Each structure stands twice: as C-alpha cells, then as structure tokens.
C-alpha cells in the first residue's frame, strides 16, 4: 500500500539527515495519497529509514499498515492535511530554524525566498511535543503560510506535491541560515513585501525594487 509514497518519504528522510536538517530520531515526514498517508514511525533514526519502515494511516489516524507506531506528531500532520489539503508535510529540528524559534516571535520577510512560503513566518507558542495543543497552535501559525516555526522546538513546512515540498524546504533552510547570522551583525534586517515575489507581481511602480 502506498509504495511510491513510502519510497519518497524514506528518500526524503535520508536526504534531510544527510543535509543535517534532522538529527537522530528528531523530525518526521509524511506524504498523502487521497485519504491515506505514509508517515515515518516513532522513535526511528531518519537517516536509516527504508520504505518498509513507514506506517500507513488514514486521515483519522487509524493505522492501516506498519509494525511500529506512527510519529508522535501524527496529530500535527493530520491537522495540516485536513485544514490545508497538503500533499506532504515535513517537521524538523533544523539547527538554524530551531535557534530562531528560541529567540523570536516572528521571522520577518528578510529574504525573498521567504515570500514563497507566504511571507513573514509566525512562531507558534510553545506546547509539549506530540500534544494536541502543539498541533492546534502550529496549525494556527500556518494560516496563509506553507511554513511555521515552533517555539523552542523546530519548524514545519508543507506543500502540495513532493516537488513543491522540496522547493519550500530549500526556501526555508537558506533564509534561516542567513537570518541566524543577523543577531551577530547587530543590524536589523530589511523586510520585503510579497509584491516582490514573481508569483504575486503586478505591473505597478510599487513592485519595482528601489
Ligand atoms: Zn519535533
């Protein structure tokens, strides 16, 4: 069941681990096909996952296949699918993003790639990992965005397809590293507006960078 999705989630887990965006067992990934979801198991090292390790659940969280339990953040993944109709979800403890989530309440749109995520990135208030409260707060922070930070915890991105998911992941990691350097510089970053992003650009003078 969901053989292609199992392969993609396992490949994504290994790639994120190779890039240092997930550490050990921290982080979880899922991909949806209709009303079924392939999700990483709880307590597994993402760098070593195989397609056969995935757990298959429905949109209500009922386990359909798999030997282990699904990720402890399953409520969060299911909520993103239900509320936003996503095709794939990645939650990670990427070091730069997590560092930002410990010290700011919102990440301004200081890099144009953040506009692909919907604009300034909200930081969901802290709640215990795996709890319904954390899922609810994070879902609220995702309103109108495809990414959010989770206070004192990590980050989440979602996309419609696996290609889009990787695009948003790439958009996320670069600006997070750039912005992570900002406090050391002692300078406040300039914010930009969504009108600068080509998808939203209209032929007006206001959209032309000065
Ligand atoms: Zn986490």
Image (cartoon, rainbow, N blue to C red):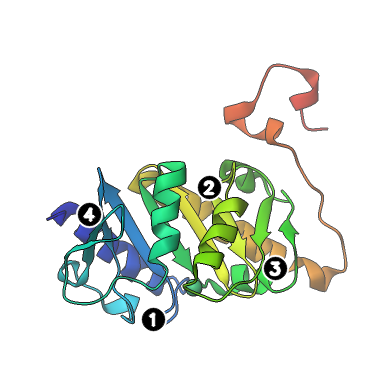
Assess disc 3: are there few (<14), some (14-19) or many (≥20) residues with their C-alpha within 10 Å of its C-alpha: some
Residue 1, image x, y percentages: 12, 56
Asked if the residue under mark 1 is in contact with the one under mark 4, i.e. CB atoms within 8 Å, the reply is no
Residue occupying the point 30% across, 68% down: 40
| Residue 146 disc label | 2
Quadrant (top left, top right, bottom left, bottom right) of the C terminus: top right
Mark 1 C-beta closer than 8 Å to ligand 1? no
State which tag comes first along the sequence, 2 or 1. 1
**Is 142 on the left or on the right of 119, as rendered?**
left
Instruction: Name the residue carrying label 1.
Output: 25
Q: How far apart, in angstroms, are the residues tagged by discs 2 and 1?
A: 23 Å
Q: How far apart, in angstroms, are the residues tagged by discs 4 and 1?
A: 20 Å
Residue occupying the point 49% across, 50% down: 168
Secondary structure under the numbered disc 3 in the rendered image: helix
Q: What is the quadrant of residue 43 in the picture?
A: bottom left
State which tag comes first along the sequence, 4 or 1. 4
| Residue 5 disc label | 4
Residue 29, image x, y percentages: 36, 63
Instruction: Name the residue carrying label 3.
Output: 180
Q: How far apart, in angstroms, are the residues tagged by discs 2 and 3?
A: 20 Å
State which tag comes first along the sequence, 1 or 3. 1
């Amino acid at each position: 069941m969901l053989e292609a999705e199992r392969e993609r989630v396992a490949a994504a887990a290994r790639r994120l681990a190779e890039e240092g965006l997930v550490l050990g067992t921290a982080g979880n990934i899922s991909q949806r096909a209709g009303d079924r979801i392939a999700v990483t198991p709880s307590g597994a090292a993402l760098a070593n996952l195989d397609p056969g390790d995935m757990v298959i659940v429905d949109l209500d969280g009922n386990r359909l296949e798999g030997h282990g339990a699904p990720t402890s953040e399953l409520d969060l993944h299911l909520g993103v699918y239900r509320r936003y109709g996503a095709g794939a979800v990645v939650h990670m403890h990427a070091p730069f993003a997590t560092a930002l989530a410990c010290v700011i309440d919102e990440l301004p749109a200081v890099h144009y790639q953040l506009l692909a995520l919907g604009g300034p990135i909200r930081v969901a208030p802290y709640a215990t990992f795996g709890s319904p409260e954390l899922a609810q707060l994070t879902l609220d922070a995702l309103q109108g965005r495809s990414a959010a930070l989770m206070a004192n915890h990590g980050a989440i991105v979602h996309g419609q397809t696996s290609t889009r998911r990787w695009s948003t992941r790439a958009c996320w990691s670069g600006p997070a590293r750039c912005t992570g350097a900002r406090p050391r510089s002692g300078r406040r970053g300039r914010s930009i507006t969504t009108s600068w992003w080509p998808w939203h650009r209209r032929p007006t003078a206001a959209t032309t960078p000065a």
